[in-house]
Structures are given as C-alpha cells and as structure tokens.
Amino acid sequence: MSFTGKATYSAGSTLPELAEDVSDIIGIISPYETPLLDALGDPLHEATSTHHEWSEDELLPNRDAINDGSIGDPLSESSFDVANGSRFRAGDQIQVEGSEELMLVTIVNSDTLSVERGYAGTDEENLVNGQVINILGNAALEGASKPQSRFTNRVRCGNYTQIFSAAVEVSGTDIAASQFGLADEMDYQKQQRLRELVRDLENTVVNGGQPTSIPEGNVSVRRSMKGIMQNLATNVMHSGDSGFPSGGDLDEETINLMLRHIWENSGGNVDLIVVNGFQKRKINSFAADSRTYTSTDTRFTNMISIYESDFGVCRIIASRWMPQDAVLLLDSSRIGVLPLSGRSFHFKPLASGGDYECGELIGEYTLELKNEKAHGLIRDLATN
C-alpha cells in the first residue's frame, strides 16, 4: 500500500485494508482461581457410586474424665465415677492431668473406679469433678489368664456425589464468522463455562451441604455433597468458647490453640491453613512487630505464606470462597475431591434443533474427608 500521508484514524472507509486495533487476548476480570483444589491435587482414585464410602477406625482411647459431683473429701476418696468406665481395667495406672499423684485401678464397676491412692509413693492430691484422667498403661499379673478382649468398631463414612453442569449454545453465524481475540467461539464458550464449574466445585467443597431428607436425591430432590465445613464437629471453635480471641480478632495464640487441640485428639498432620483475604491479612500481621528493615531496603514485605509451629508446618492458602469469619486447618493427606468414574468434567454434544450448535459441560464429584478429628475450624472471627 502506498503512503497516503493520512493518520489511520482519518483514513476512513477509503482504506479497507486497515483493521481495527484489537488485541488478540481477551481479558477476564471475574475471579475463577481454585487455590484449595490446586493444593489438594488430583485424587488417586475415583468414586464408583453416587454414595462414595470409606472406612475409619481409631485406637482404644486412653483418656477420660472424672464425672462425680458427689466427691466429698477429695484427699481420701478411693472410688469415684468417670464418664466412660469401659475404658478402664483393673491394673491400669492412671494420673489426673496436671497432678503428680499416680493411682492404680483395683476394681471397675460400670462407671465407678476403685483405686489405690498415692501409688508408687506419690503424694495424694485433690480430685475435682471434670478433671481429665490419663491412662498410662496396664500392669498385668504374672501367670494371669488373658484379659477380656477389647476392640473398636470400624465406621463406614460416606458422601454423595453432586452433578455440576452448564449449557453451551452458539449460533451458526458466530461459528462461521471471524472473531477478535479467539479462533473458535464454541471452544471459547466451553472454556468459560468450565472455569465457572471448577470455581463452583471449590466453593461447594468448602461450604456445601446435603439435604436432610432423601440425601441420595430423586426426580424432585437435588443430590448434593457435604462440604468440609459441614463435616467438621470435634475441633470447632466459636465465639464465646474458651481460648477464643478477645474481640474476635484472629491471633497467633488462637491458631496454636486449635493446632494443639487437633494434635491432642488425633494423629493428623495439619499442613494447610485456608482463609479468606481478610483473615490472611490478620495472619500476615503476626510478624509485623518483629520485622526489621535497613536503609537500603526498597521493598516492603508483609506476607506470611508458611506458618511453622510445634504442631506442624502449614502452608497458608487464601481462597475467595472461604467465609470471612472462618479459618480451616486441614490435613491434606486425608482429603480428596473425587469424580464419579467416567464423569469428570467433559463436554457432551447435544442434538441441534436449528441454526446453532449446542452441548453441555457436565461433571459429577464428591468430597472424601477422612477422620474429621484430624482437621479444625475456627468461626465467628471479627471481619472489620
């Protein structure tokens, strides 16, 4: 094309060769990241039924508590009631938490223990209703008959699968016409809807619940999975609980308290702390008072991405889909997001009824969360 001396904006329609200056990249501003799913990674197996099940077990407990409001003279009590007498046997050495006194169980009668106080020359100490008792171990008699067998019952746990779907429909004209920023309108629409579905999957994995009746679903009841927050019951802290931060502001003491509770109640290894943006800033402030800078520093850093405590090394993940008042502490080795066999996200073409092409993006997934005692949840934190 010969030089005309005109600027492109003044060339008008006399130069049909000039194209609009439109970038070939389409900017997407809507958030669609899935940091929790990325951290958990792909599962090692698939679900094979709409009700996915797994087995859980635990060791016989070695802790209990005094449950006797009638304790009179604590220093002379040689028998008292406990919450679960079945956890004890004659010959058990026991010790009240925080006490140096050892006791030996001599008789177990339902939930009542008869004990030898001041065992092994230790000094007797006061007993208080509600105190935690640790069972140190059992001392068997030489030549004695075998003790009564004890065992735990394995528990079958499960979760239902949930179908995620989105329709795609593109007219014949849009398919045929050249589009700025993309090569194929149908492929572009598939990518957009898939981003939305994966985003919704993470949101449901965190917050989802299932119907209280007919959880398996039918033609009028939608089947849905139970999310992480709905699964947790043992290590859950709410406003008003002992140890909850004053004013509701998340602090390091609260994080460590929950990590200790999980450590005491399970053999889990918490390696993920999942928070929203607000609580992530609170965690970043843990080290604010101890940071130092020199006169040559030109970069200000205020971020904590890994938190290392006595109870494990935790990667901190900021997820948009976490409630602002909540913090999840998770053992990622016990969590999986599983597709139903053959039902991971895929595109299913559908018959067209006119001048358009259509289909459906569909996937069916469930959450496998094992040993809920290995995880923790803090709720009702301040959000302003």
Image (cartoon, grey):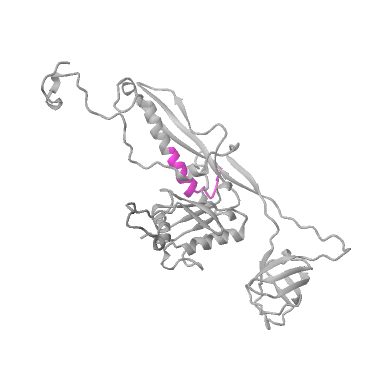
Determine the residue positioned at 46% across, 65% down: 239
Magenta span has 57?
Answer: no
- Number of dots carrying numbers: 0
> Is 144 on the left or on the right of 45, as rendered?
right
Is 121 on the left or on the right of 6, as rendered?
right
Give the image location of residue 57, x and y in percent: 67, 52
User: Residue shown at 59%/55% (left/top)?
Assistant: 373
Q: Nearer the viewer, residue 3 or 329?
A: 3
Q: Estimate the x, y position of residue 126 in percent, counting from the top left.
A: 66, 80
Look at 11% across and 23% down and name the residue there.
6
Residue 304 position in % (x across, y down): 43, 54
Quarter of the image with the C terminus in it = bottom left
Instruction: Point out the residue furthest to the top here.
Output: 1
The part of the chain drawn in magenta is 197-218
Q: In the orientation shown, which residue stands out farthest toward the right?
A: 143
Q: Nearer the viewer, residue 308 or 349?
A: 308
The residue shown at (74%, 69%) is 93
Could you say which quadrant of the image residue 14 lies in?
top left
**Image-quadrant location for residue 13:** top left
Whether residue 126 is visible, yes or no, is yes
